[in-house]
């Protein structure tokens, strides 16, 4: 919803027209699933074995997930990815389902890149 609001008010921030379809295939089928496996699946497993409270697992995984997006050198992207990381963290903590998060990540990320928000 925030992407739609931003895009309708401000338009594209970045010209990503040079990205080929192979990039989007890579993002959807490799990058997003690997990120979710790492930040939700694997990291939650480690933090659970460390006996950390669920809320702390969610905060740590969201913070680390947001930090990996520093590569974009953009504060709004860092904040929004941390925020969506919180949402995905709550979802994973409740349902332990990576598939729905992977699909959400793939769609949101691909759309954000396609329209030039990231």
Image (tube, helix red, strand yellow):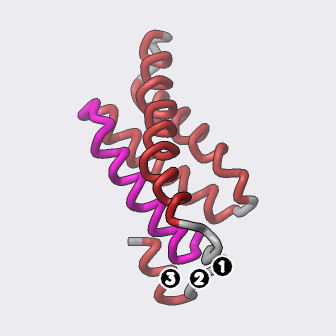
Q: Nearer the viewer, mark 3 or mark 2?
A: 2
Mark 3, residue position: 7
The vertical placement of 24 against 9, above or below, is above
Residue found 33% across the figure and 32% down from its top: 93
Point out residue 8 in the picture as x, y percentages from the top left corner. Answer: 47, 88
Which range of residues does the magenta coloring cover?
94-118
The vertical placement of 118 against 49, above or below, is below
Point out residue 96 in the picture as x, y percentages from the top left corner. Answer: 28, 30
Point out residue 62 in the picture as x, y percentages from the top left corner. Answer: 52, 41
Q: Residues within 10 Å of mark 3 (few under 14, many from 20)?
A: some
Whether residue 96 appears in magenta in the rendering, the answer is yes
Label 3 element class: helix
Residue 12 is tagged as 2
Q: Quadrant of residue 54?
A: top left
Residue found 38% across the figure and 71% down from its top: 1
| 3D distance between C-alphas at marks 1 and 2 | 7 Å
Q: Residues within 10 Å of mark 2 (few under 14, many from 20)?
A: some
Secondary structure predominantly adopted by residues drawn in magenta: helix
Q: Nearer the viewer, residue 86 or 110?
A: 110
| 3D distance between C-alphas at marks 3 and 2 | 6 Å
Mark 1, residue position: 15
Point out residue 108 in the picture as x, y percentages from the top left corner. Answer: 42, 61
Residue found 40% across the figure and 39% down from its top: 89
Q: Nearer the viewer, mark 1 or mark 2?
A: 1
The vertical placement of 55 against 50, above or below, is below
Label 2 element class: loop
Indicate which disc, 3 or 2, sits on the residue closer to the N terminus. Answer: 3
Residue 62 falls left or right of residue 87: right
Marks 3 and 2 close (CB-CB < 8 Å): yes
Q: Residues within 10 Å of mark 1 (few under 14, many from 20)?
A: few
Marks 1 and 2 close (CB-CB < 8 Å): yes
């Amino acid at each position: 919803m925030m992407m739609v609001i931003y895009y309708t008010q401000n338009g594209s921030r970045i010209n990503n027209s040079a990205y080929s379809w192979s990039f989007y295939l890579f993002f959807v089928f490799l990058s997003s699933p690997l990120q979710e496996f790492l930040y939700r699946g694997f990291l939650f497993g480690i933090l659970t074995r460390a006996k950390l409270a669920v809320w702390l697992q969610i905060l740590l995984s969201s913070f680390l997930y947001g930090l990996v997006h520093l590569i974009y050198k953009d504060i709004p992207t860092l904040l929004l990815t941390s925020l969506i990381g919180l949402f995905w963290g709550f979802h994973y903590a409740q349902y332990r389902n990576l598939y729905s998060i992977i699909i959400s990540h793939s769609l949101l990320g691909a759309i954000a890149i396609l329209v030039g928000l990231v």
